[in-house]
């Protein structure tokens, strides 16, 4: 669901995002990484590229890198008023919590989960 939501929120660089996602699904992580870095060269701190790189970091079990990339992606759209963007923030916070749990940082993970829950409740109102 996050991929479809991300495409609704971020219409720029759709083709590149789709190509990188296909590479990731095929296990072609180096190719996907190159595309995400190209996207970041076009637009620094582009949230979908940061999120894509976080997926790659998860696949190679680099949770500290994943957590940092997710936080950077969240920071780029934090304060958004659009429901879809807020929904992405909630999803990415949950993913960040997962990385934090794997790093043994349960208290930080609880904070992310709490923040995610709050955003979901606000989005439902």
Image (spheres, grey):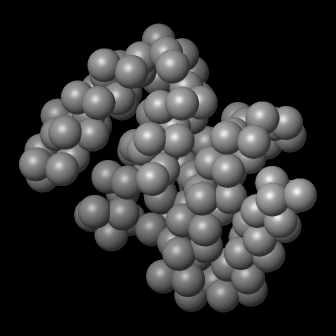
- Left or right side of 18 for 103: right
Residue 6 higher or lower than 111, as above or below: above
Examine the image and state in which quarter residue 75 appears: top right
Percent position of residue 24, x then y: 21, 46
- Left or right side of 86 for 6: left
Examine the image and state in which quarter residue 116 appears: bottom right
Percent position of residue 35, x then y: 28, 26
Residue 58 higher or lower than 39, as above or below: below
Which residue occupies the foreground of this view, 4 or 78?
A: 4
Give the quarter of the figure containing the C terminus: bottom right
- Left or right side of 99 for 22: left
Residue plotted at (79% across, 75% down): 114
Residue 63 higher or lower than 122, as above or below: below
The residue furthest front is: 125
Residue plotted at (42% across, 44% down): 3
Percent position of residue 17, x then y: 35, 29
Residue plotted at (53% across, 75% down): 98
Which residue occupies the foreground of this view, 91 or 46?
A: 91
Is residue 30 visible in the rendered structure shown here? no
Residue plotted at (32% across, 52% down): 56
User: What is the number of callouts on the image?
Assistant: 0
Is residue 1 visible in the rendered structure shown here? yes
Percent position of residue 55, x then y: 37, 54
């Amino acid at each position: 669901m996050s991929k479809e939501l991300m495409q609704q929120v971020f219409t720029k660089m759709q083709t590149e995002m789709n190509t990188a996602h296909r590479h990731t699904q095929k296990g072609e992580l180096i190719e996907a990484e190159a595309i995400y870095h190209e996207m970041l060269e076009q637009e620094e701190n582009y949230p979908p590229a940061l999120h894509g790189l976080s997926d790659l970091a998860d696949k190679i079990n680099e949770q500290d890198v994943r957590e940092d990339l997710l936080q950077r992606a969240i920071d780029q759209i934090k304060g958004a008023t659009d429901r879809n963007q807020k929904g992405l923030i909630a999803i990415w916070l949950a993913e960040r919590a997962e990385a934090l749990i794997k790093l043994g940082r349960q208290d930080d993970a609880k904070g992310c989960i709490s923040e995610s829950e709050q955003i979901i409740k606000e989005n439902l109102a």
